[in-house]
Image (cartoon, coloured by chain):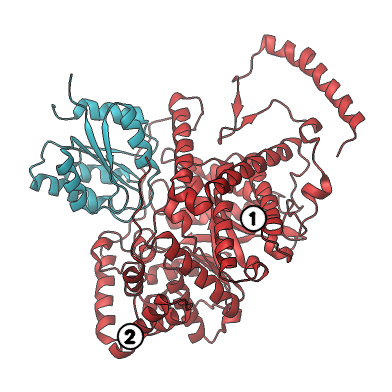
Amino acid sequence: MFDEKALETIKAGKEKWSNDVVGKTLAKNPERKEVFTTISGTPVERLYTPLDVAGLDYGKDLGYPGLYPFTRGVQPTMYRGRFWTMRQYAGFGSAKESNARYRYLLSQGQTGLSVAFDLPTQAGYDSDHPLSMGEVGKVGVAIDSIEDMKVLFDQIPLDKVTTSMTINAPAGILLGMYLAIAEEQGVSFDKVGGTVQNDVLKEITVRGQYIYPPKATMRLTTDLIEYCLKNVPKWNTISISGYHIRESGSTAAQEMAFTIADGIAYVQACVERGLDVDSFGPRLSFFFNAFTNVLEEVAKFRAGRRVWAKIMKERFGAKNPRSMMLRFHVQTGGVTLTAQQPLNNVVRVGLQAYAAALGGCQSLHTNSYDEALCLPTQQAVTVALRTQQIVAEESGAADTIDPLAGCYYVEAMTEKIEAEIMDYLQKIDAMGGTLVAIEQGYIQKEIQNSAYRFQKEIESGERVYVGINKYTMEEPPPQGLLKVDMSVGEVEAGKLKKLRAERDEAKWKAALDKLRQASQTDENVMPSVIEAVKAKATVGEICDVWRDIFGQFRPKEYV
Amino acid sequence: MAKKIKIIVAKPGLDGHDRGAKLLSRIFAEAGMEVVYTGLRQTPEMIVETALQEDADVVGLSSLSGVHNYFFPKVVELLRAKGLDDVLVVGGGIIPREDYEGLQKAGVNAIFGPGTPTTEIVEYIQKNVRER
């Protein structure tokens, strides 16, 4: 972007400044540290100048919003058209309680729903299963059957809101229920919009809500993608997630690299299924974390957009620009929140939300300040939603596109993260691909090593964390935390008993038999899943059919 | 020389948050302990069986999904039923302070919340573990 003569002048000027001006200052006042690094451990220089981005080619590397390689954003007008979707992940207790919170959030200006399911639902167990003991309704809403799902979306028009569901191995079942309810509301499938996470690979590496072995679970993922392509055209069929990779301790570059590696595996699986990359490509979406180091996060998002665009175009031969767009949801970093002085978290979340906006996210969840203590209270949830409304309406970040482009530091960091991503992708390819890298524990170990490094930095005091290793204080125990009633489990178990007694046994059995048959062949399972949920088969029952056929995943632990 | 401290690090229930459990497993090993990490999805019965098989001195429980009040006391109860009264039981994760007292009354020896330096946990175990 600079001609050579200008660069030479800048270089001479910088050297002079370094030697004469900086040297003198350092002699009197040394800097705070010898080496400055981001929270990911990436070194940060004293000053960035055009010299650090000398290789940058504006047209090729940055381009324009809505155009390849999408470094500057995926839409031509970004937030000048409309803000990102404000989507708070919520759900707890029974379907009725969660429905009340969704309606509250929608009444407060939230524009999309995001459903948190409890762990039994995510792991494919009914509320009365022995492994569900103590967990029912705890970290999300308990859904056993279509009856619960009806209560969850009571009075919520499914043609007006879009819904994101954090569900992976059993994604098809919950989507099936959602579609069946849309049908009952008189909403046709082509008007239904939303997302299922459906990203089973990161369950195996970092999140732990796996059910089936990798190949089988990938088949179910691909079935869902294929089914929606033909029947639910507005549905985002997968949300390839780096969020949990980062939560588990990865660096920013690792988060992006391992997510893209997972993305490559899904695209590969769909291509092997015989799907055209430009048919399913536009419906792939992503999900990332945002930490407090705003500039590093912005660089991460920009680098990710550029890398994904190149991979889809060059590696997979995509022709439709929409297939090349890294469209993503962001959640602020849960792991960055402290139980100590919890109100400080409001500021962390504010900076993280600002990073997501400057980074060009399509939707955003802001965490509540009390989440290191308990599930969020209504007050904390409201502050979190207001935080993103302030970023949207007051900060100015939404008024011009990709405002940090051209910032020497951010551009240099974007290039650096891109190089790191490409390096990881090469290593993973050399190993034989993402599935092999996961089987060998490579990805898991890389993440754990970063988590370990971070912990050591905190404990040595090398990295300051406010309220943890500096600026600490005695404080009274927090009051008014949200408690989930332990009796949810019993209530849900009672409802299940009633459902099983009252449903049409013959219809239920026929539907499960049909599902079993489809699952044993190459047939897409989705139509028979939808039949089964309509016949009131439960999440656990459907998952058991697949457990019988596919077996269960048992991870090796890499410690 | 005293025998190495043997610790079981366990994840009860369906919770998948294992960053802390894995990190501490590594830290305990570096501190000279013998570590057995159970992995995810452990029932109290499985955890106690492992403790018995391994002749563990310490059981460390990690929970971030809000089920500590159910699982931790259950593990203590089963340990006692097997006669493992002198096994030190420690826990950590997202556990509200107001739950600490109840857990300690139920026989959990110590709870370590978010932000606790790992050195503090190691020292506590070294000081309070049974004679070997």
| Horizontal relation, residue A410 to residue B43: left or right | right
B55 is higher (above) or lower (below) than A69:
above
Secondary structure category for the residue under label 2: helix
Quadrant location of residue A69?
A: bottom right
Q: Quadrant of the N terminus of chain A?
A: top right
Disc marking residue B7: none
Cα separation between marks 2 and 1: 43 Å
Query: Can you see residue A110?
Result: yes
Does the residue at mark 2 contact the one at mark 1 (Cβ under 8 Å)?
Answer: no
Query: Can you see residue A168?
Result: no
Q: Chain of mark 2?
A: A
Look at the image and give the colour of chain B.
Answer: cyan
Look at the image and give the colour of chain A.
Answer: red
- Residue beneath disc 1: A361
Q: Chain of mark 1?
A: A
Q: Quadrant of the C terminus of chain A?
A: top left
Secondary structure category for the residue under label 1: loop
Number of marks in picture: 2
The amino acid at mark 1 is Cys
Q: Image point 47% across, 81% down: which residue? A: A527
B23 is higher (above) or lower (below) than B96:
above
- Residue beneath disc 2: A508
| Spot occupied by residue A382 in the image (x, y as percentages of width and height) | 51, 56
| Spot occupied by residue B118 in the image (x, y as percentages of width and height) | 35, 31
The amino acid at mark 2 is Trp
| Spot occupied by residue A449 in the image (x, y as percentages of width and height) | 46, 36
